[in-house]
Each structure stands twice: as C-alpha cells, then as structure tokens.
Image (cartoon, helix red, strand yellow):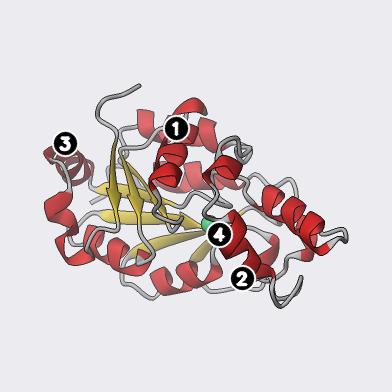
C-alpha cells in the first residue's frame, strides 16, 4: 500500500489549500493541471447495486436504464430516501463494486503522465465508508493522489482552481457538471449515464456516446493528455 495516499474529510473549502500536503501542492503547481474525478457512476459502477437493491425492496424489476433521473423519482417517490437511509451509508455494499470499463487503465496512464488525480466524492463520511472507498481503489489499481469527501464539490473545485492550474473534472452528476461548467476555466467532462443524457451545453465534454457500453474513459484520457504542458 502506498504511504503517500491521503484523504480529506469534509474540508472547509476556504482552507483546502492549507490542508494539502506539500507533495500534492507542488505536484499540481509543477504540472499545471489537476484532474478531479468523482467515484460513483464514474469509477465505480454503483448503479448496478442500487437497482438490484431497489428491485428487492419494491418487489418489482428495476433496471439501470429505468433510472433516467438522478433523483430516482422515475422509479418511486420514496426511492432516493430509501437509498439514502439504507444503501448509500452501507460500506459493505460498496466494498466490491465493479469498476467502470476503462477506468483503471485510463487513470493509470494519466497518473504515469504525472497528472495529479484527486478523487472527489460526496459519499457519506462514515469511518467505515472512508476505509472501504480507499481500499476499493487500491484493490482495483485506481491511482490517486488525494481522496476528498465533500458535498461542496463546486467550492472544492473553485479552491483548487486558485492554484492557477488547469482543472479538469469528471462527473456523472448532472448538477455537479452544470455547477462546475459555470465556473470560469474549468473543463467539465460529463460521464454519460441514463440520468444525464438530457444535459447539453456547448463546452461540456461528453464522455461516452451513450450510457450503454460506452467508452467514456478513452475520452477522458484523450482530453487530459491533450492539455498536458499547456500554459
Ligand atoms: Mg457520481
């Protein structure tokens, strides 16, 4: 296990840069780029366990393609509430999540190119969940320099931006994508999913033609590599 892996839990965005280790701080400044990547729906295929759980709970078949809304309102008015109470905080359920196709390979190449990788997740900040999230990445050869747990994604991205580097974010959450897109000089890569196909903005890069069998990670790799060594 690499010793330099670090995590920040609910950091105050105003103090974020002070909380960075010298190592990550210098790496971002020197490479002039930072990749900020979400976990669920981007690295981890969490939707597969959510739909399985909802099927059992609601006693009817629920498929990933039925989830056309990020808040699960098209499945059931109570679906999101039930997931928030019983599934999202359950570390055990997140222990062996499948990895989205191409994520480990693309992030491996990005890390090798010297690009700092920050995983930014809004997962519940329970000790068990933090441990599982970290171990899951290590077990699946997902490289990262820093793991940040925060629901204040826009503010965290803004804080990293203060380093003056290029910031590239990858997320499947339509709200995060729109919020980040409104920040100046942030490259937003929206990772295609059934619940975000309605989002269309000039300037938002879409990773994956569609939600099925898409190759979003090759788009991410290409977008990051072409920004290397640019002022
Ligand atoms: Mg996500």
State which mark lies toward you, 2 or 4: 2
How packed is label 1: few (under 14 Cα within 10 Å), some, or many (20 or more)? Answer: some
Can you tell which quarter of the image residue 17 is in?
A: bottom left
**Left or right position of 183 against 100:** left
Earlier sequence position, callout 3 versus callout 2: 3
State the separation of the CA atoms marked 3 and 4: 29 Å
State which mark lies toward you, 3 or 1: 1
Q: Which mark is residue 74?
A: none
Q: Which residue is mark 3?
A: 23
Vertical order, 168 against 4 (above or below): below
Q: Which residue is mark 4?
A: 172
Please give the name of the residue rendered at 61% of the width and 39% of the height, measured from the top-left corner: 97
User: Considering the image in quadrants, where does the N terminus appear?
Assistant: top left
Please give the name of the residue rendered at 22% of the width and 45% of the height, measured from the top-left corner: 28
How packed is label 3: few (under 14 Cα within 10 Å), some, or many (20 or more)? Answer: few
State the separation of the CA atoms marked 3 and 1: 21 Å
Earlier sequence position, callout 1 versus callout 2: 2
**Left or right position of 29 against 68:** left
Q: Which residue is mark 1?
A: 135
Q: Which residue is mark 2?
A: 81
Earlier sequence position, callout 1 versus callout 4: 1
State which mark lies toward you, 1 or 2: 2
Earlier sequence position, callout 3 versus callout 1: 3
Asked whether mark 4 lies closer than 8 Å to ligand 1, one says yes
Residue contact between numbered discs 1 and 4, judged by CB atoms under 8 Å: no
């Amino acid at each position: 296990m690499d010793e330099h892996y670090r995590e920040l839990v609910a950091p105050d965005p105003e103090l974020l840069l002070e909380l960075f280790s010298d190592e990550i701080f210098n790496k971002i400044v020197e490479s002039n780029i930072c990749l900020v990547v979400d976990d669920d729906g981007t690295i981890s295929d969490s939707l597969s366990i959510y739909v399985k759980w909802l099927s059992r709970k609601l006693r009817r078949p629920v498929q990933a393609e039925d989830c056309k809304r990020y808040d699960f309102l098209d499945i059931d008015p109570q679906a999101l509430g039930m997931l928030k109470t019983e599934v999202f905080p359950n570390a055990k359920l997140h222990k062996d999540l499948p990895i989205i196709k191409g994520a480990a390979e693309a992030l491996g190449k990005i890390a090798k190119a010297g690009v700092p990788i920050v995983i930014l997740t809004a997962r519940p900040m329970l000790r068990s969940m933090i441990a599982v999230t970290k171990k899951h990445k290590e077990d699946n050869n997902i490289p990262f320099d820093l793991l940040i747990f925060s629901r204040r994604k826009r503010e965290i991205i803004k804080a990293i931006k203060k380093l003056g580097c290029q910031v590239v974010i990858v997320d499947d959450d339509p709200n995060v994508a729109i919020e980040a897109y409104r920040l100046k000089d942030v490259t937003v890569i929206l990772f295609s999913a059934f619940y975000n196909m309605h989002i269309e903005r000039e300037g938002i890069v879409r990773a994956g033609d569609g939600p099925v069998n898409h190759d979003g990670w090759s788009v991410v790799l290409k977008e990051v590599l072409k920004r290397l060594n640019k002022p």
